[in-house]
Image (cartoon, helix red, strand yellow):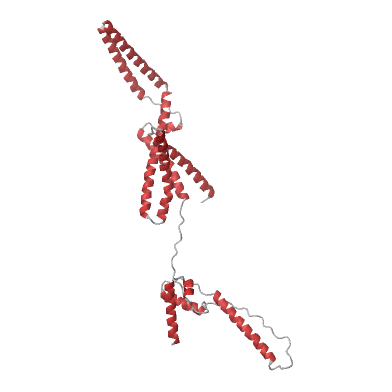
Amino acid sequence: MNPVLNVGLVATSLALTAVSITCEIALFTGFAQTELDQYLAAVTGAGLVASQFLLVGVFQEHLHQKRRGLATGVFLLITLLLGISVAGTAAWLETRYQEQHQIALKSTQEHQLVTQLLEDFEQQASSLREQAVLDRKTGNHWRAGERLKEAAQADEQRIKALAMLKNIKSVPQNSGQSLASENNALRWGLWVILAALIDLCPLLGFASLRNPKVLPVKTPTQPAISAEAPEVSAVTPLPVKTPATLKSVNRDNAPAKSISTESNAINSATIQNTSLNNTATKPTLICCHNIADHQRLLQEEISAGVYPEGPTIRALMKRHHVGYKKAKVIYGSYKKVCVKKAS
């Protein structure tokens, strides 16, 4: 993956993770009463959100190692943690919306007029009840009863004003309030979608960053054993040094011995070079499926001169990549064949 893309993916994933952790902490600290409760709630919220991202690597590792049971358990745990995190983020968004909604609602002129009416009706009802108490003390019970009826009418007007206050709609002051619907179901659906995106984007981002490398599977192939002898590279003959002058004395013996000696040296050098080339071009077929394949391969190697001093168990172990027991069986079969040929 492109390094620039990796850096951008890490930066955005960490930023969204911080938002998710903050919302989760706010969800848990809302139930805290003491300072210790607040600390515990903060640690719990941060730990749960961080766990869901860290468990992604654990899930990938189990899946790569083909541990299906553990992978399924980790996946279910990640799903549960994701649901709690989404709920916390959606609750935080709803809280922020309600705060902005109340501020926008109280700033409208209609809301201010109805609020003033509520205060007036409450003061009127309270004043009438106080006057009714004074009328009773002076013995004017009829007057006190009328005051109480007027106080009851003020209470009714106050209830109607409260109903009017509930029906007042706020004027959106920003794009967020315009996007949110007055319908609770639609608004909560929007919050859940946004919260899911806040958690899923870093979750998939971290999963993409930590992708275990799949090791290539080696498939055994049947060796193609050829009956032809291994090719021998051409050997450059060594230069032959011929005597510049032959002695006139003893022409029948001395020169003949000198030429014979040099010819023997040339032949031995040629044989040595041929042996080295045979060793360099020895077959490398070492992938066999059974003992018979190893035996045929051993015969080919012996014919090619791979074992100048004869095969040994150690050489078979190293050459054929087999253990001691299998090499011993191959070596024993080779010995039996040699004994039969000798007899």
Residue 239 pos. (x, y %): 66, 81
> Which residue is at a point 43% across and 26% down the rendered structure image?
103
Asked if one can make out residue 89 in the rendered structure from this viewpoint, the answer is no
Q: Nearer the viewer, residue 24 or 311?
A: 311
Total number of numbered labels? 0
Where, by quadrant of the figure, is residue 45 drawn? top left
Residue 141 pos. (x, y %): 25, 7
Q: Residue extending furthest front?
A: 36
152 shown above or below 139 = below
Asked if one can make out residue 268 in the rendered structure from this viewpoint, the answer is yes
Q: Quadrant of the C terminus?
A: bottom left
75 shown above or below 298 = above
Where, by quadrant of the figure, is residue 222 drawn? bottom left
> Which residue is at a point 56% across and 79% down the rendered structure image?
275
Query: Relative to 61, is 242 on the left or the right?
Result: right
Residue 120 pos. (x, y %): 36, 15
Q: Nearer the viewer, residue 308 or 32?
A: 32
Where, by quadrant of the figure, is residue 179 drawn? top left
Residue 185 pos. (x, y %): 35, 35
